C-alpha cells in the first residue's frame, strides 16, 4: 500500500445519489464496500462526512437563522450521516468507532487524538460533529483531524476524477491537473477546500488527493499507488 493511514473526506451531498435530499441506501452500501476493501488490505482509515444532504448552517443563516445555532444543526447533520455509514459498515462486518467533535452520549464518544490513533489500529474511525465549534466547515474538520491522527494524506472523494481548470460538468474544454502545489492552487483560485482547511494542510505538510469516489474500486486503486486523480502538496 502506498498509504498506510488516511483521512477520507466525503461530502454529504454525495450520499444523496440521484435523490434531491437525504441518504441513498445504494450510495451508502457502495461507499461502505469501498472502505471495507481498503480496510481489508490493512489501511488505517478515518472518515469525515459533511452534512449538506440534510442541513447547512450557512443556508440557515441566509434565511435569517442565527449562524451559531445553524452551524450546530449542521454538525448534528454530519452525525446522522456518520451513524448511517457506521451502521452499513457494521452490517458488512467492519468494526467501527464513532467519535465526535461534540459530546453526544450514548451515541458516540468525544474525539481525542489519543483515542482516535488507538482505535485506528483495529477499526474504521468515523468522525462526526465537525470541529465542535461554529464557523468551521467539515473541510477544516478534515484537515484538523488528519493532522491530529498523523494521516499520510487526505483523500477527498468527489464525483469528479480530480481538479480541473474549470468545472468539467459545465465547461467541456476544462483540462485536468495531475498535480499542483498549494501555492499554485491558491494562485489559480481552484476551490479544492476552504481557505482555513487549505492553510492548515499547507502549514502542516498534509497532502490532499482529489479523486472520483463514485467509481467502484477507485479508493483501493489510489491506495495501491495508481494515479487516477489530482494531488495537491508542498513542492
Image (cartoon, rainbow, N blue to C red):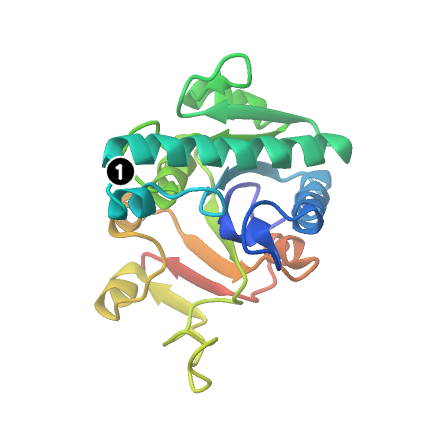
Q: Which residue occupies 59% across, 24% down?
A: 97
Q: Which residue occupies 31% across, 66% down?
A: 190
Label 1: how many Cα within 10 Å (few below 14, some 14–19, many 20+): some
The percent coordinates of residue 52 (x first, y second) are: 44, 47
- Residue 10 in view here: no
Image-based side of 166 in relation to 86, left or right: left
Q: Which residue is mark 1?
A: 65
Q: Residue furthest bottom?
A: 173
Query: 74 or 235: nearer the eye?
Result: 74
The percent coordinates of residue 55 (x first, y second) are: 42, 42
Question: Relative to 116, is 60 above or below?
Answer: below
Q: Which residue occupies 53% across, 38% down?
A: 47
Q: Residue furthest front?
A: 64
- Residue 34 in view here: yes
Query: 154 or 98: nearer the eye?
Result: 98
Question: Relative to 185, is 91 above or below?
Answer: above
Question: Relative to 213, is 81 above or below?
Answer: above
Image-based side of 75 in relation to 25, left or right: left
Q: Quadrant of the C terminus?
A: bottom left
Q: Which residue occupies 48% across, 75% down?
A: 169
SS label for mark 1 = loop
Query: 230 or 141: nearer the eye?
Result: 141
Question: Relative to 208, is 105 above or below?
Answer: above
Q: On the image, which quarter does residue 165 sit in?
A: bottom left
Image-based side of 215 in relation to 196, left or right: right
Amino acid at each position: 500500500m502506498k498509504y498506510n493511514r488516511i483521512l477520507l473526506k466525503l461530502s454529504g451531498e454525495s450520499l444523496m445519489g440521484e435523490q434531491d435530499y437525504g441518504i441513498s441506501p445504494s450510495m451508502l452500501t457502495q461507499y461502505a464496500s469501498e472502505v471495507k476493501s481498503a480496510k481489508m488490505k490493512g489501511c488505517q482509515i478515518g472518515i469525515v462526512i459533511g452534512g449538506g444532504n440534510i442541513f447547512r448552517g450557512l443556508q440557515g443563516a441566509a434565511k435569517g437563522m442565527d449562524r451559531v445555532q445553524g452551524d450546530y444543526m449542521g454538525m448534528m447533520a454530519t452525525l446522522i450521516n456518520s451513524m448511517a455509514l457506521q451502521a452499513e459498515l457494521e452490517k458488512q462486518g467492519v468494526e467501527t468507532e464513532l467519535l465526535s467533535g461534540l459530546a453526544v452520549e450514548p451515541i458516540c464518544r468525544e474525539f481525542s487524538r489519543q483515542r482516535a490513533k488507538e482505535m485506528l489500529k483495529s477499526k474504521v474511525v468515523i468522525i462526526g460533529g465537525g470541529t465542535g465549534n461554529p464557523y468551521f466547515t467539515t473541510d477544516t474538520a478534515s484537515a484538523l483531524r488528519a493532522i491530529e491522527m498523523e494521516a499520510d494524506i487526505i483523500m477527498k472523494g468527489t464525483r469528479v476524477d480530480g481538479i480541473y481548470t474549470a468545472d468539467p460538468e459545465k465547461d467541456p474544454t476544462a483540462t485536468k491537473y495531475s498535480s499542483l502545489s498549494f501555492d499554485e492552487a491558491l494562485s489559480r483560485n481552484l476551490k479544492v477546500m476552504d481557505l482555513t482547511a487549505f492553510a492548515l494542510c499547507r502549514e502542516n505538510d498534509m497532502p490532499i488527493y482529489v479523486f472520483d469516489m463514485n467509481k467502484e474500486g477507485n479508493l483501493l486503486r489510489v491506495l495501491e499507488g495508481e494515479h487516477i486523480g489530482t494531488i495537491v502538496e508542498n513542492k
